[in-house]
Amino acid sequence: MRKALTGALPLAMLIGTVGATGATAGAATAAEQAAPAAVTAVTADIKDQILAIPGMSLIEEKPYPGYRFFVLNYTQPVDHRKPSKGTFQQRITLLHKDVARPTVFFTSGYGLNTNPRRSEPTAIIDGNQVSMEYRFFTPSRPSPADWTKLDIWQAASDQHRIHTALKKIYGKKWLSTGGSKGGMTATYYERFYPRDMDGVVAYVAPNDTKNDKDKAYDKFFATVGTQECRTKLNNIEREALIRRTALKKIYTQFAKDNGYTFTTVGTLDRAYEATVLDFAWGFWQYSLASDCDSIPVAKTATDQELWNTIDSIAGFSFYTDQGLTPYTPYYYQAGTELGAPTISQPHLKGLSRYGYQPPRNFVPRSIPMTFKAGAMKDVDQWVRSHGRQMMFVNGENDPWSSEPFRVGKGNRDSHVYVAPGANHGANVAGLAAADRAAATASILKWAGVAPAAVKKAKPLARFDAKLDKQDRKELMRERSLRP
């Protein structure tokens, strides 16, 4: 993926601590296998019950009507295979409603939003929600950082330990969920710990099983929307490369004014082209087909209009050192396990100097990277052959949905849905009526809260404008080509 939107919400609030603790992770792991001894009464305050879990500490509690909301640190092993080799503090949040309700385990696959938020499945089942910051996203990063311990199995094991600890308190059914890289994370967790969750709801989760063969993405960009819109977007990219010298002058001043540097990507020119080549992808990822009307005609646009148009969607600050640094963990994973798209962009032939750049270009060279070609194939085969109560929701006009997860003959009660005309924000609410009812019914059933008789399945919780906030600005917080 790439790019983070100008003016977007901060990825992570720098609260809490990072680094190794005095106690060994081995001791913490062993202790957490036993039920918390400090609090045994059912009537004990929920905060006391949570903090009685070995390795759990409170950062802060934030009030919210009808809930208790906790921001917490949890002691995790740096290496789950060798838990005695050190620990780090991983941030989680807990939106507590009632221990008698089911629980949703949410992760974005990136940093942690430390404000109360409710994922769609949480609202559907009217339950509790545990949210986890992905390992190596600050401040949930070991110190020193051994990057070889950032992989999908280690992250799934983080989730497994959190679930094991909290299941003693939240004993009803659990679902895992997430969108984009968070949907990937929920899927990988299910692959490695298939007995933990009672269902999975993965939104717009890419499934790059053949990293060197990305024809599906090329087909998407050749057919999405109307020919008129595709041409309009392609012409913006072409014109920006034709006017490279003029627009780079604007970029140079922009970088100087903001103190931006380009050590990781190499040069301002490389960063400039990477941003331009993200434009059409970023448009379809977060805009609607109707938004094409607002894109200017490339030939008649001024240099500043071209700059502003690309900046508003792809963001010229992203490929600076300052823009890339928070996303080093993502690009490391994309270049070692997840894979990343390589699109041909034939309309830029003779104009592009670097092509669609790989993840290696966006990670400091001091961090070694080796790609594991079999990681995604293993997950894909497992989902097709062994997936149980898994749901994949994709967007018709979302580039990342070009290579989706699919269910196979070995699946039980698993489903794939496509939201008509939807982008990277596709959800159950945006499905066609029949699919929406079926998907909602499945989620309620998996969580064990389906009404005895239901003609039209619908969310159990009332909509809360603040708690269920899914507006475009928040959606674009982790923007553009990152999943």
Image: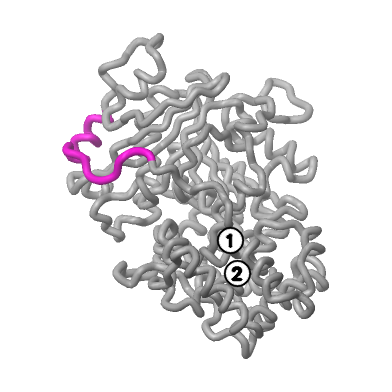
**Three-letter residue code for mark 2:** Asp
Secondary structure, mark 2, is loop
Closest to the observer, 203 or 280: 280
Residue beneath the point at 54% across and 75% down:
272
In this rendering, does residue 162 appear at all? Answer: yes
In this rendering, does residue 212 appear at all? Answer: no
Q: Left or right of 455: which side holds 10? A: left
Taking the magenta stretch, the answer to whether it contains residue 24 is: yes
Q: Is residue 350 above or below residue 360?
A: below
Q: Is residue 155 above or below residue 175?
A: below
Residue beneath the point at 67% across and 25% down:
460
Residue occupying the far bottom of the picture: 350
The disc placed on residue 480 is 1
Q: Which residues are magenta?
A: 15-33
Answer whether labels 2 and 1 touch (C-beta < 8 Å): yes
Closest to the observer, 117 or 86: 117
10 Å neighbourhood of mark 2: few (<14), some, or many (≥20)? many
Closest to the observer, 199 or 433: 433
- Residue 399: quadrant of the picture: bottom right
Closest to the observer, 313 or 150: 313
Residue beneath the point at 56% across and 53% down:
180
